[in-house]
Image (cartoon, rainbow, N blue to C red):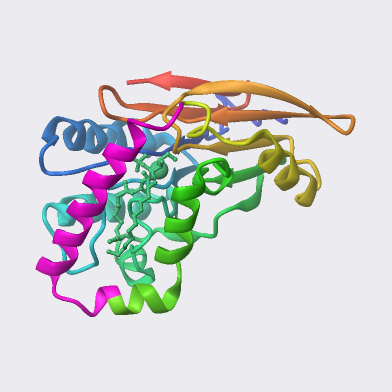
Amino acid sequence: MKNIGNKLGQSLYKPDLFISDLHLCASRPHITAAFLSFLQTIAIQANALYILGDLFEYWAGDDDFEDHQLIVNAFRALADFGVKIYFMHGNRDFLISQQFCDAAKMTLLDDPILIDLQGVRTLLSHGDHLCTDDIDYQAFRLQVRDPQWQNNFLNQSLQSRKKQIETIRLQSEQEKSQKSMLIMDVNQQAVNQLLRKTQYPEILIHGHTHRPDQHQIQLDGHTITRWVLGDWYEQGSYLRRDETGFHAMKL
Ligand code: LP5
Ligand code: MN
């Protein structure tokens, strides 16, 4: 990786930042404040900000505004400053629409997606579809990711949608307490299958499991690094890629 310098010898390399699982909501205002501060002080110095899903605690539809306008304005300001913003759906906010992304000046990414990260083949995902041992969740996911199901759901009143989400969230929390940690982690075969399909990228970055870590994978003679992003429940965290490599950072 070339480190381009200016006449004063300062590095002109701008880092790329990766975050996920912020779960922003009105009941955790300190996390929203920490995120807004992160955008204004850290992300503003970046080349790009990649948000790999679960930005919001849940998304019932674009008509559920709460304090989202504050976030939209902050994204717009960041984009106007020249920082590229990419967003990928998570299992909590997959109903965020293209129109919302346009309003926030974010580019909506497919999940998974292979990108050229300033010279490094990098695969990005939220990660939930890799948890293939979680059979009940995968069945639920298949149902709610169906465009026709989503149309039906979005045609209901906001009040009714929120009520249903509340029910699912309670059920999800109850079921999660019965599931083993292993079942709720990514399945190595599913990861390997994806890495083969995408011709062995150097890096895989995902969130969802809330188990921040760095894993080295040896597969068919290739070495792939899997970075898992942390959540923002207690403290903000992000992955930074600069001219010296990848670094897991805490706020
Ligand atoms: O999010 P997290 O990490 O806590 O848990 C996930 C899985 N749970 C979910 C559910 C979400 O947390 C809550 C819903 C978000 C709002 C989406 C908005 C639109 C959808 C509206 C639906 C009415 O994703 C959890 C995984 C865990 O990750 C780890 O991977 O285990 O999965 C579950 O616990 C799901 C249960 O196992 C299955 C739930 C079956 C529900 C069946 C009823 C379907 C009827 C739908 C129509 C009302
Ligand atoms: Mn998730």
Residue at image x 45%, y 60%?
107
Taking the image as shown, residue 187 lies to the left or right of residue 145, namely: right
Seen as rendered, the residue at the extreme front is 178
The C terminus, quarter of image? top left
Q: Can the viewer see residue 5 in this picture?
A: no
* Location of residue 168 in the rendering, given as x and y in whole percent from the top left corner: 26, 52
The N terminus, quarter of image? top right
Nearer to me, 76 or 34: 34
Quarter location, residue 186: top right
Taking the image as shown, residue 247 lies to the left or right of residue 208, namely: right
Residue at image x 41%, y 50%?
90
Residue at image x 31%, y 44%?
172
| Secondary structure mostly seen in the magenta stretch | helix
Q: What number of labels is visible?
A: 0
Residue at image x 14%, y 35%?
28
* Location of residue 170 in the rendering, given as x and y in whole percent from the top left corner: 21, 45
Quarter location, residue 246: top right
- The stretch in magenta equals 153-180
Taking the image as shown, residue 200 lies to the left or right of residue 110, namely: right
* Location of residue 52 in the rendering, given as x and y in whole percent from the top left corner: 46, 45
Nearer to me, 32 or 212: 212
Vertical relation: 185 (above or below) 56? above
Vertical relation: 166 (above or below) 156? above
157 magenta-colored = yes
* Location of residue 44 in the rendering, given as x and y in whole percent from the top left corner: 36, 38
